[in-house]
Amino acid sequence: MDIMKRYKWMIMVLVTVILLSFPTEMKANSAEPPGFTVLVSNPPDDMSLFLLFPDESQIKKIELQKEQKAWETYYRFFYHMSPWKKYELDGVILAVESKEKSSNYLLPVETFKTYNNLLTLDLKTDSLVIGQSPFRVPILVALRVVLTLTIESLVFILFGFRQRRSWLAFFIINIITQTGLNAMITGPGIGSYWLIGFVNLEILVIIVELAAFTAIVKEHKRIRTALYTITANLSSLVLGGLLITYLPV
């Protein structure tokens, strides 16, 4: 069996193992329903967010769904939860309620003009704005890339790679592939379907890294380098996938 046929069989086995390792519940809808997310960093544990509509005598306040990941909390509102028939709403108030803080913020009309919008509530500056901090995505991507490099560097050592040239290739290849991968799965609006994209992108990363590592790293035989690439990426796929479920995205 030549080297190309061997790689094809390895990739087929890899894809099968990944698919069997991640059973998941299938849902009929193909995407998360339209709505918006309010991002809050380090809010009080008892803090809840509500929408107050212009005519409170007829419409009761609606509580936003809450999801916490590490230091960030996401408050989500889906348009189908609204008793109003239109999505562009004037005068809607975002009410913040907790023992420490009680405030009202006027929601910008632009909030309702996109399929999935992201707003940031900054408790320190007492402000509500559309979008997020320009530093948030780079910080989260860098955090996940460092975690991935830590996992895969341990596998690199276990496979006996010691030469400076091998390590230089390791860092260059992984920084490029892992930064691209993590940049594409960043954002609290990615919903519950992130795992599908994560697995598909990870398969693409494995294929790219197989080609790059076997072509550049010459410290050991190609088969050993290829086995390292598959093992390292499977390790980061499983462990990284678990970490992402607990870390902000």
Image (cartoon, rainbow, N blue to C red):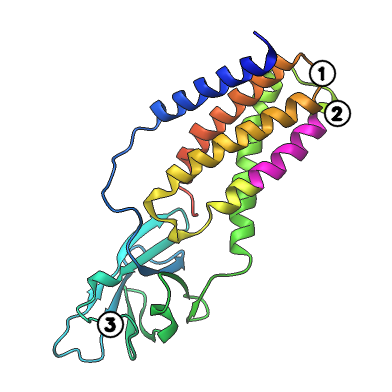
Left or right, 197 with respect to 4, comes to: left
* Residue 245 visible: no
Question: Is residue 76 positioned above or below 234 on the image?
Answer: below
Labelled disc at residue 86: 3
The answer to whether mark 2 and mark 3 are in CB contact below 8 A is no
> At which x and y percent is residue 83?
19, 78
- Dot 1 or dot 2: first in sequence order is 2
The CA distance from mark 1 to mark 2 is: 9 Å
Magenta span main SS: helix
* Boundaries of the magenta span: 167-179
Image quadrant occupied by the N terminus: top right
> At which x and y percent is residue 67?
35, 58
What amino acid type is highlighted by mark number 2? Arg
Left or right, 245 with respect to 184, comes to: left
Residue annotated with mark 1: 219
The answer to whether mark 1 and mark 3 are in CB contact below 8 A is no
Residue annotated with mark 2: 165
Looking at the rendering, which quadrant does residue 167 occupy? top right
Q: Secondary structure at mark 1?
A: loop
